[in-house]
Amino acid sequence: MQNRIMITGAGSGLGREIALRWAREGWRLALSDITDGGLQETLKGVREAGGEGFVQRCDVRDYSQLTALAQACEQKFGGIDIIVNNAGVASGGFFDELSLEDWDWQIAINLMGVVKGCKAFLPLLAQSKGKIINIASMAALMQGPAMSNYNVAKAGVVALSESLLVELRQSEVGVHVVCPSFFQTNLLDSFRGPTPAMKAQVGKLLESSPISASDIADYIFRQVAEGEFMILPHEQGRMAWHLKQKNPQMLYDEMAIMAEKMRAKARSVSS
């Protein structure tokens, strides 16, 4: 193993914490994001943690920027061993309120950004027999109310990861998918939705989470080392996933009640 890793969305939040976790093991890191400021801060932290690397601005919606990043990894590192498709944005709103533009934006970043990342880096990963780590969400498995476009995009990331898991086994490229629940992060900075009330409700969920991005990065590091495909960092998330597998109808009923409460709350705020 050459110890070379590329991370999208590395300028903040979970992306930054994943970078710092691998840096502590002395890895070389290719860090990308759409903002330069956050990337420089992450690189500084990476160096202090014992890692080394470079930063490159990259919008995951643009395939040519991802192929340019792959070329930079080849030039500077001679290849890549792990890619982490982490860049993502939050959104929420009931289906009847979401515009088609909201859907396009969400799918373009949270799903197609991952597809393009895998596509751009697969030739390098095939050479190194490397690993793909795709960051999805518990929303991919549980489909909570008032976030259908986010749920669909993240479910697509799980389906893509499952497809790659079976297709790439012969070429010895490993695949992992991570489904965190809500955790303390700056995801809301990118939040897009039709109502301010929805943003406030998601904000409360993020704040109430007892687990930090740093905890999740550490859990991912350990599970990848153990070869686990489906990585569920939250205890509650693991319990909810087991429940859904055993009794999906019970969960749908629970979610429907939650949707009614959310609609009632949104109405009381707007009236």
Image: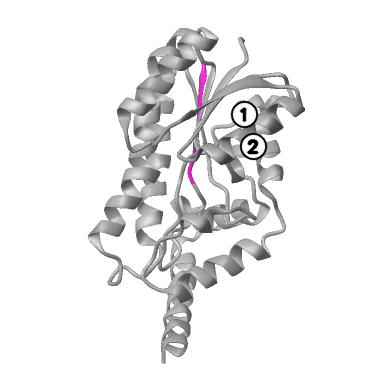
Q: 223 or 6, which is in the foreground? A: 6
Q: CA distance from mark 1 to mark 2?
A: 26 Å
Residue placed under numbered mark 1 in the picture: 224
Main secondary structure of the magenta stretch: strand
Q: Is residue 131 magenta?
A: yes
Extreme-front residue of the structure: 37
- Compared to 76, does 152 lie above or below? below
Q: 225 or 239, which is in the foreground? A: 225
- Please provide percent x and percent y for residue 177: 51, 37
Is 230 situated left or right of 121 in this image?
Answer: right
Q: Amino acid at mark 2?
A: Glu
Q: Are circles 1 and 2 on residues that touch, CB within 8 Å?
A: no
Q: Which label is found at residue 41? A: 2
Within the image, what quadrant is residue 149 found in?
Answer: bottom left
Residue pictured at 45% horizontal, 16% vertical: 72
Highlighted magenta segment, given as a residue range: 130-136
- Please provide percent x and percent y for residue 19: 63, 31
Residue pictured at 36% horizontal, 27% vertical: 65
Residue 168 makes an appearance in the image: no
- Please provide percent x and percent y for residue 115: 35, 33
**Label total for image:** 2
Q: Which label is found at residue 161? A: none
Image color mode = one colour
Is 91 situated left or right of 210 in this image?
Answer: left
